[in-house]
């Protein structure tokens, strides 16, 4: 751990300092990249203790690595979590949460509007592994409550929804979760902790694709799972990886031994030691570096996105814009409450010319890149119905608000006049 406690420092200071310190061995100021699989044990006793979870320490980088641990401490600090587990992608972060908390026959309530990859994962886990998603009709707290049954074990939503930019009333959904004794999992990728810290509103677990705003430059794939450490797992009598003995760890009961970080420990033991999607130390280093500028970047991302959304809304060839921070938009009140400075920089809009106009607009862009990532420094555009959300049935596409006429934008940090000029020229080329 670092020699001073950064938890009392302000957010932007923690983004630079939390989880790292000058290297005691060399004085290196930047976080060293520990490219090693294994770590030499001091003794047979220490080796056995680490393996049995009686002692903490590094043994093998699939389960933990010092560079990756620095990233885990930093993101845990920014999210206000007790612990975090970094993984190889945002996709594996969601997978590990669902598999750590549930087994075949269980069900979970999920927002019907989610990142397309999460929806695809949920469908496959249902048909092959018997974990049933109970999709909500809308995104209001009462929609989540209405979907809960006896079989429900978890509630899942995104803080800001990919791709439509809608802001979810996390406090309202958390109140529903508490009433039913269920943990709330929030995918906070589109907000980043600079805009929304779901744990402050009652979330129990926060996941990220660190491939997006946290790393920031579109260079690495990664994910992270944060444990608020507040959920009373024992009171439920469920969640057997957390509450029942692990026979191969001398009868370890995770919630007894690690009451404050029980979920994170179970997620690491099962998710990393057994399933294996660990994060590379190189990717952890690049993500740590990215996070140092996160608060600054998010300010510009939001300001640029708001200006682009306002420009589009006023344009005669545009049918609608889904950016809730504009006056008169659906979801404006919730957005203003959670993200008064703007609902991130990912949103959708549609052209009056329908699908062909959407496709032609994307091909007509010159500065803005046509590619599938989001949340990076460069501005990006994509047609979700034929790419990120193409595996969905038409009714699922409608529920996720990605019809054939929809374009998704991820607005970057370029000078706003240049972005608007590019959009203007692409629109001008449409009939
Ligand atoms: C991109 C994304 C993911 C998946 O993350 P990868 O790092 O691409 O695996 C999950 N959730 C949301 C909201 C995303 O935007």
Image (spheres, rainbow, N blue to C red):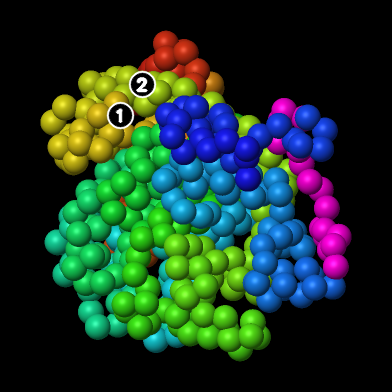
What is the magenta segment's predominant secondary structure?
A: loop
- The reply to whether the C-beta atoms of the residues labelled 1 and 2 are less than 8 Å apart is yes
Secondary structure of the residue carrying numbered label 2: helix
Quadrant assignment for the C terminus: top left
Mark 2, Cα crowd under 10 Å, few <14 / some 14-19 / many 20+, is some
Q: Is residue 304 magenta?
A: no
User: Could you tell me which residue is drawn at 46 percent across and 54 percent down?
Assistant: 82
Q: Which residue is mark 1?
A: 342
Relative to 396, 289 lies left or right? right
Q: Is residue 41 magenta?
A: yes
Where residue 389 sits in the image (x, y, percent)?
43, 54
Where residue 404 sits in the image (x, y, percent)?
35, 48
User: Could you tell me which residue is drawn at 24 percent across and 26 percent down?
Assistant: 313
Q: Is residue 282 above or below residue 57?
A: above
Q: Looking at this view, is 180 or 360 the one in front?
A: 180
Q: Looking at this view, is 60 or 291 the one in front?
A: 60
| Disc 1/disc 2 C-alpha distance (Å) | 7 Å
Q: Which residues are magenta?
A: 28-43
Q: Is residue 82 above or below residue 150?
A: above
Where residue 136 sits in the image (x, y, percent)?
24, 65
Mark 1, Cα crowd under 10 Å, few <14 / some 14-19 / many 20+, is many
Relative to 140, 32 lies left or right? right
Quadrant assignment for the N terminus: top right
Where residue 3 sits in the image (x, y, percent)?
62, 37
Q: Looking at this view, is 325 or 181 the one in front?
A: 181
Q: Which residue is mark 2?
A: 303
Q: Looking at this view, is 381 or 257 the one in front?
A: 257
């Amino acid at each position: 751990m670092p020699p001073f406690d950064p938890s009392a420092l302000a957010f932007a200071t923690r983004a630079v300092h939390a989880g790292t310190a000058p290297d005691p061995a060399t004085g290196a100021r930047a976080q060293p990249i520990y490219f090693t699989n294994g770590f030499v044990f001091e003794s047979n006793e220490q080796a056995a203790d680490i393996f049995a979870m009686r002692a903490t320490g590094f043994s093998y980088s699939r389960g933990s690595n010092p560079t990756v641990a620095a990233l885990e401490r930093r993101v845990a600090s920014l999210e206000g979590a007790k612990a975090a587990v970094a993984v190889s992608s945002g996709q594996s972060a969601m997978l590990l949460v669902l598999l750590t908390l549930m087994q075949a026959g269980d069900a979970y309530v999920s927002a019907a509007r989610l990142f397309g990859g999460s929806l695809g994962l949920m469908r496959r886990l249902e048909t092959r592994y018997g974990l049933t998603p109970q999709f909500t009709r809308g995104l209001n707290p009462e929609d989540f409550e209405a979907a809960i049954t006896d079989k429900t074990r978890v509630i899942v939503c995104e803080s800001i929804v990919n791709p439509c930019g809608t802001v979810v009333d996390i406090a309202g959904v958390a109140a529903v979760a508490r009433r039913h004794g269920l943990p709330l999992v929030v995918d906070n990728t589109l907000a980043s902790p600079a805009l929304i810290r779901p744990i402050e509103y009652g979330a129990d677990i926060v996941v990220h694709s660190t491939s997006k705003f946290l790393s920031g430059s579109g260079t690495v794939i990664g994910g992270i799972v944060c444990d608020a450490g507040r959920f009373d797992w024992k009171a439920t009598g469920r969640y057997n990886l957390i509450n029942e003995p692990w026979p191969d760890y001398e009868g370890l009961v995770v919630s007894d031994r690690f009451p404050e970080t029980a979920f994170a420990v179970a997620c690491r033991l099962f998710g990393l030691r057994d399933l294996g999607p660990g994060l590379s130390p190189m990717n952890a280093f690049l993500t740590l570096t990215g996070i140092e500028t996160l608060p600054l970047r998010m300010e510009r991302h939001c300001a640029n996105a708001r200006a682009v959304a306002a420009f589009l809304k006023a344009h005669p060839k545009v049918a609608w814009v889904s950016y809730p921070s504009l006056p008169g938009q659906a979801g404006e009140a919730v957005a203003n409450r959670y993200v008064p400075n703007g609902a991130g920089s990912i949103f959708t809009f549609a052209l009056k010319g329908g699908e062909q106009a959407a496709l032609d607009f994307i091909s007509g862009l010159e500065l803005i890149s046509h590619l599938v990532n989001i949340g990076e420094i460069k501005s990006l555009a994509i047609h979700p119905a034929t790419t990120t959300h193409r595996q969905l049935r038409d009714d699922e596409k409608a529920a996720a608000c990605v019809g054939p006429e929809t374009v998704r934008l991820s607005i970057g940090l370029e000078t706003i006049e240049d972005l608007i000029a590019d959009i203007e020229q692409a629109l001008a080329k449409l009939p």
